[in-house]
Amino acid sequence: MTSSPDERVVPASVGLCLHQPRRRVPLEPFWMQFLRGAEDVLAERGITLLLKVVGDLADEVATLRRWHDTDQVAGVIVVDLAAEDERLDVLRQLGMPAVVMASPLLAPDFATISTDNASTMREAMDFLAAAGHRRIGRVSGPRGFMHTVVRDDAFSEAGERLGIRTSVVEADYTAAGGAVATSELLLADPRPTALIYDNDVMALAGLDVVLKAELRVPEDIAILAWDDSVHCQLATPPLSALMHDLIDYGAQTARVLLDVLDGAPKASRVSESPHLIERASTQTVREAAIG
């Protein structure tokens, strides 16, 4: 059977670039689960996911141009959106189909998949405040990412609303970065009585730092991780976490991109927000640590 002149031959791949430390990809459960969900949906259409780990934004832009020029991919998934992100301008110029993992307000010309980071952060802060915490530290992801900015703002605003002293140390989602940031927060006088981490890898590294400092979890310091994982569940003590169905998140993202490729006029979706799973790392607050 031959294709009609109006039919476009679509490459059997879509692309995803991750510009981050290469050591982070196999370590972070977020991407492993996300990719599993996306690949399952794409496989139903005979499409593969081409993953490229790049060193920086310039490398990613070059990859996008190369994919376009060689017709290697039919479309792309854009992650970790930054302010005034160069990739969006490049994709507009190329006319390359894409889904952007960000709020529609941040990428108005594109199909998007988003989750409510602000309300999730408020839920976490309300939960810790209700347990009696009045000094809360946070180990954040890179501040160049818009989702980090959203979490930063929500964290600060919740602190002001709840009368909580807040402090933030930026890290890079790696275990090493989480450990260094935790050590910095522990030097504060008075130190925080609870710590929120922007991913599970940093939270697990932070737990190790806290325990090596001969502090008790949760009696001296409570720990809460963003993105649940089996590692959080098996930690000692098990870590409370903000659980997001990452397999479903990846599947929904792939479906949005398929909608774009199929010419659907309104392809954006809002993913279910993470919800808090309480475990032993936040269940007890020592009275002397409150106030």
Image (spheres, rainbow, N blue to C red):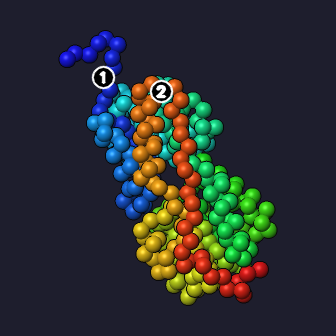
**Residue type for callout 1:** Val
The residue singled out by tag 2 in the image is 264
Q: At 53% from the left edge and 47% from the top edge, which residue is drawn?
A: 271
Residue 155 visible, this angle: yes
Q: Residue at image x 72%, y 87%?
A: 288
Res. 90 in view:
no
Report which residue position mark 1 lands on: 9
- Mark 2 neighbour class, 10 Å CA radius: few under 14, some 14 to 19, many 20 or more: few
Q: Name the residue at 42% across, 61% down.
A: 28
Q: Residue at x 51, y 32 (%)?
A: 267
Residue 89: % across, % down? 54, 30
Could you tell me how far apart the alpha carbons at marks 2 and 1 are, in whole angstroms? Answer: 17 Å
Q: Label 2's element?
A: loop
Q: Nearer the viewer, residue 127 or 176?
A: 127
- N-terminal-most mark, 2 or 1: 1
In this picture, residue 69 sits left or right of residue 219: left
On-image quarter of the N terminus: top left
At numbered mark 1, what does the secondary structure look like: helix, strand or loop?
Answer: loop
Can you tell which of label 2 and label 1 is closer to the viewer?
2
Pick whichever, 241 or 170, lies toward us.
241
The image quadrant that residue 254 belongs to is: top left
In the picture shown, does residue 217 fall above or below 268? below
Q: Do callouts 2 and 1 mark residues in contact (Cβ within 8 Å)?
A: no
Q: Residue furthest top?
A: 5
Kind of residue at badge 2: Ala
Q: Which x, y percent locates residue 244? A: 50, 57
